[in-house]
Image (cartoon, coloured by chain):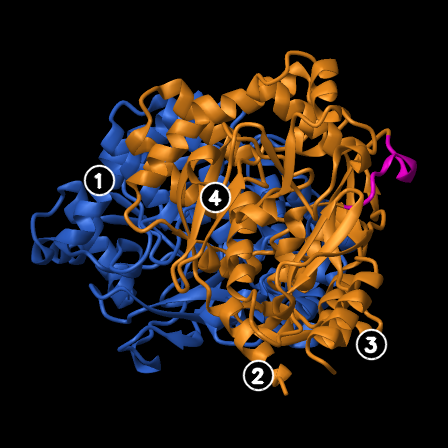
Chain colours: A orange, B blue
Amino acid sequence: MVDIERANATAVGRMMEARPILKGLAVARDVIPSMKDNLLLHAGPPIEWARMSGPLRGAVIGALLFEGLAKTEAAATAMAEKGLVEFAPCHEHNAVGPMAGVTSASMKVYVVENITHGNKAFSNLNEGYGKVLRYGAYSDEVLKKLRWMNDVMGPVLADALAASRDGLDLRALLAEALHMGDEGHNRNKAGSLLFLKWLAPLVAKVARDRQVEHDVLQFLGDNALSILNPVMAACKAMADAAHNIEGSTLVSTMARNGTDFGIRVSGLGDRWFTAPCETPQGLWFPGFTAADANPDIGDSTITETAGIGGFAMAAAPAIVTFVGSTPKDATNATLEMYEITAAEHKYFTIPTLDFRGTPTGVDIRKVVEKGIPPRINTGIAHKQAGVGQVGAGLVRPPMKIFEDALVAYAERYKF
Amino acid sequence: MVDIERANATAVGRMMEARPILKGLAVARDVIPSMKDNLLLHAGPPIEWARMSGPLRGAVIGALLFEGLAKTEAAATAMAEKGLVEFAPCHEHNAVGPMAGVTSASMKVYVVENITHGNKAFSNLNEGYGKVLRYGAYSDEVLKKLRWMNDVMGPVLADALAASRDGLDLRALLAEALHMGDEGHNRNKAGSLLFLKWLAPLVAKVARDRQVEHDVLQFLGDNALSILNPVMAACKAMADAAHNIEGSTLVSTMARNGTDFGIRVSGLGDRWFTAPCETPQGLWFPGFTAADANPDIGDSTITETAGIGGFAMAAAPAIVTFVGSTPKDATNATLEMYEITAAEHKYFTIPTLDFRGTPTGVDIRKVVEKGIPPRINTGIAHKQAGVGQVGAGLVRPPMKIFEDALVAYAERYKF
């Protein structure tokens, strides 16, 4: 008979003791396992072209144009329809990407290493706001920015990271950012500034061109999400350390592809449990309404999986001006998550809750028993390809995936 | 008969509508009114050498060595004893300085302009932590760092600030920092990072030497108080805009010289009301105890005067790990200050209090009637010259100065 409590303590202990260090920036094909030129990684559980939502299709088109695999939108679409492009979840290649999460072979990715357990995780560069690939935009302007990021900023960042002896301790950065009003998913203002603070002197050391240096520091400084992608890779490295613990009922992956929400459970191997995504509720950018919103999308729920994001909203009362809520609701969101988690985080604490650790390690048993699905902070994409972000808000996964996982657990462990 | 409420509304309205912009960095003798070579400005109300506390004497000695006016500690002490040095409060020269606040003619100072009302304020460069002049240390190491700041970092900062078209809006920076866990006096982590973010691309533009550029970005990034001095000048510019309003009972200056606590009142002109300082209670750096603490010192109470610092502690729950307190006490500190202030700040808001404006504009009538003196967050200096910081904590001004001011007000306005 499996000792579930013990298995969960092991899993959540590994998740918290994982120490992800940002070590470098490299070309995806050189570092991501089994990456290849006609493979596009995407957010969420597996999905074929026919079932992809608008923003994911838009990002696929953009990535094919970026790679030069297609010359036009029509050619890109035809390639995808004809099955000339392979698709796989980022999560199945040790990677994560926000929103559409589309990562192609030439893109530069952050390399994060969990120095406690030795596993690695990868994430692409953050593009900032407005019309961006991750929200399904793929205009010339979008591709031009991507190329600047990859070919101009990329080498500077890579050199700067290489010039650091120890890399950047992302667990320590997150712990500090949670004391500075971030929750680590939708609000990464403080974390991005801490990243810039660490990076700027290294950039000053390695940059060869003053204008490029200026532009890189300006771009990173203006983007209050610059640390999101390294943070997601850090959370992936922490969650992966908690995966495949025999008998554990803790969730080790939560991710959405814009059509389906998928979870994986530590004690149930690499099997996905999926159901259609909900559509987030929140605040809309000028000119958009709820009718424009795509269903929930992105690997960024890896933050909630690791005990931050929506789970740490009490640390980030100012976020309510962005997602639509009140500071009291933000506190209650965190308090509710203690109901469905296995532990209070050892390193991530919330000052206003008397430095209580964040609720960490979602237990599928508790979710189903109490009828409380996890809470998620998220950006909201336009449902059509090519548009971009329309707002930000709050969402929950469908309850069905937790129920299905619990049934599978009972079958697997003969309860 | 003077309309006190109306006068106070005018004063606090001017304080809040003041918009201080960081415009430049210049040599004190070139920009501070009536500055001269044998004049040392200091924190707090006026004081002669004989009554100065250890840390203020230490900073005076250090400044005389820095200026080359004395070659040795003994020579510096002799100059001061013989009356060869003039002393005046920073506050009487449109300036402010943290802790000892000693500012000499060759030192570079930030130039802050309130573009709403046209007045200017000045503050010296922040030295960071450890053995520093502002805490009364004056060893070779202290002077070496001061010279590097003034002669190497200074020109880079001056050029960077000059390269900015609009300068840095310090009111906007503070408003943002209060949403990121700062209170603006003892905790300026977020504000200092926002400053660095704004400054780094400008530094990249103007710096001529890579190593210097690296060192400047490293120094500013490592110093979570780098924005304190510009913030103090901003608060001074705001408070000065509220000064000399006929009939106003609002406090326009609170400052301590390590011996006396002094206030000035808007409707009572430039007269100081003083009484002996209290000694702060707080947390001690390793190796020090309450017995080492000097009485309260510094112009940094200009932050509380302008509605932040101890008055905004509810915005900065994480500060309690530094000053010794609980998050609940931090919230209560802010709530108590609403009892003695004239307004809730229009631009400085506190997320956890449902974005309520910070308590702003201390009314001497309310302080005396309710028996509640203002609350102040502060660093704590060793009582002997030459040592430095020993801790950080909380303190209040002596009640007597508010009582004396109220009596003077009654005499002046014939109540």
Q: What is the magenta segment's predominant secondary structure?
A: loop
Sequence-first disc among 3 and 2: 2
Q: Please report, as a chain letter, where disc 1 is located.
A: B
User: Does A363 sit left or right of A286 as displayed?
Assistant: left
On screen, residue A151 above or below B412 = above
Q: Which residue is mark 2?
A: A6
Q: Which residue is mark 1?
A: B148
Query: What amino acid is labelled 2 in the image?
Result: Arg
Magenta range is A288-296
Label 4, secondary structure: give it.
loop
Observer-nearest of A132 and A348: A132
- The quarter holding residue A27 reads top left
On the image, the x and y values in percent for residue A305 come to 64, 61
Q: Which residue is mark 4?
A: A33
Report how far apart the C-alphas of labels 1 and 2 lie in the structure: 57 Å
Report the mark closest to the observer, 3 or 4. Answer: 4
Sequence-first disc among 4 and 2: 2
Report the mark closest to the observer, 3 or 2. Answer: 2
Query: What amino acid is labelled 4 in the image?
Result: Pro
- The quarter holding residue B162 reads top left
